[in-house]
Amino acid sequence: MALHAELHRHLGGSVVPRVLWRYFQRNRTDLAQPFSNYEGFEDFYTKPRNTLDEYLELHTLVEGVQTDETLPYFVYRLMRGAYIFESLAYLELRYTPYLRTPDHLSQSERIDRMTDIVEIVGKASQIGEYPIVTSQILCMHSRLPYEVNRAIVDLAAQMQHYVCGVDLAGGDAYYADRLDEFVELYAYAQSCGLKTTGHLYETTEGCYPELLPYLMRIGHGIQIPLRHPDLLKQVAAQGQCLEVCPTTYLKTGTLESINQLKVVFDRCFEAGVDIAICTDNAGLHNVRLPFEYESLLTHDVIDFHQLQLCQDAAFRHAFAWTHKQPPASILSNILNPELKPVG
């Protein structure tokens, strides 16, 4: 029975190394050539990086091959793995559609082609044999010009049958010089009736309280309980949820140990702030969502009751989930009829 909701997964980072390697061997031998075998590629693809910037460079490797022609190939394999190996009932896929358009085209031509990309991803993710409720989050990007980011918001508003919200990605350290611009774009997104999340408070350089009022969920947000716990009361009052992606912080050098997340969970639970546990880039990490839960449990970061709180929070804060109760709670009530439902 499907139990999990995944709220923070990037389309580019979702391609597991074996799938990407096979694609390279069959279609892009130039990209496979630098590696003598699969093991060498997997080590390169999944090894920890020193900084978030270095880590984000890996996305360009996948973005370059996720075209309108190849996206159905990648999305099908993503959905199959998510259903069979992760027991996902709900999945939000986030990405920047502009970066899936041909880079030899002009900016205006690439903007026009974004509609096709959203349509392709939307249709490819609707697979009867793997019945996951899925929707898209379109990412504005900190290194794209205002005109492109505005067009991404417009596209999200126009295609809400496929899109459930907007995000801001590309490295949170780069927001500072364009903060007014991003505030305007988020306010515009809200005026269009869009739901909002954003990569914020992931790193010590990416802490911008000015953006917090415009977010329904906070992408990562771990620096709030770690370094700015005074903001937890505000986050709780606004009903915001943190999208915590444990393995990411080890891969980017943001944290040295998963045990450092215990402070994050303890302070959030104490303050009444919801946390959804996510993978972020399951392919880059070669780690699926159930392992993220297991890893937190085995390192005593959370207990089983807190795990259920996080499971339920993920469904409760899902932008496109319309059921009254998450599958995790339904199964819990069947197995433990005397256990009081969470939430």
Image (tube, rainbow, N blue to C red):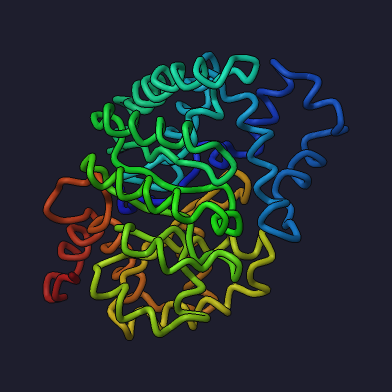
Residue 170 location in percent, x, y? 57, 47
Q: Is residue 317 found left or right of 168 in the rendered image? A: left
Query: Which residue is more in the foreground, 322 or 228?
Result: 228
Count of labels in the image? 0
Quadrant of residue 66 in the image?
A: top right
Q: Vertically, is 137 above or below 29?
A: below
Q: Which residue is found at the position 36% from the left and 70% from the top?
A: 307
Question: Picture coordinates of residue 83 (x, y %)?
Answer: 39, 40
Horizontally, residue 119 falls left or right of residue 56, namely: left
Q: Residue at x 34, y 53 (%)?
A: 4
Q: Residue at x 59, y 73 (%)?
A: 258
Vertical arrangement, residue 57 with respect to residue 173, above or below: above
Where is residue 245 shown, x and y percent of the image?
50, 60
Q: Residue at x 70, y 30 (%)?
A: 21
* Nearer the observer, 184 or 98: 184
Quarter of the figure that contains the C terminus? bottom left
Can you give x and y, in whole percent of width and height, for residue 109 in the image? Answer: 51, 15
- Residue 247: name its quadrant: bottom right
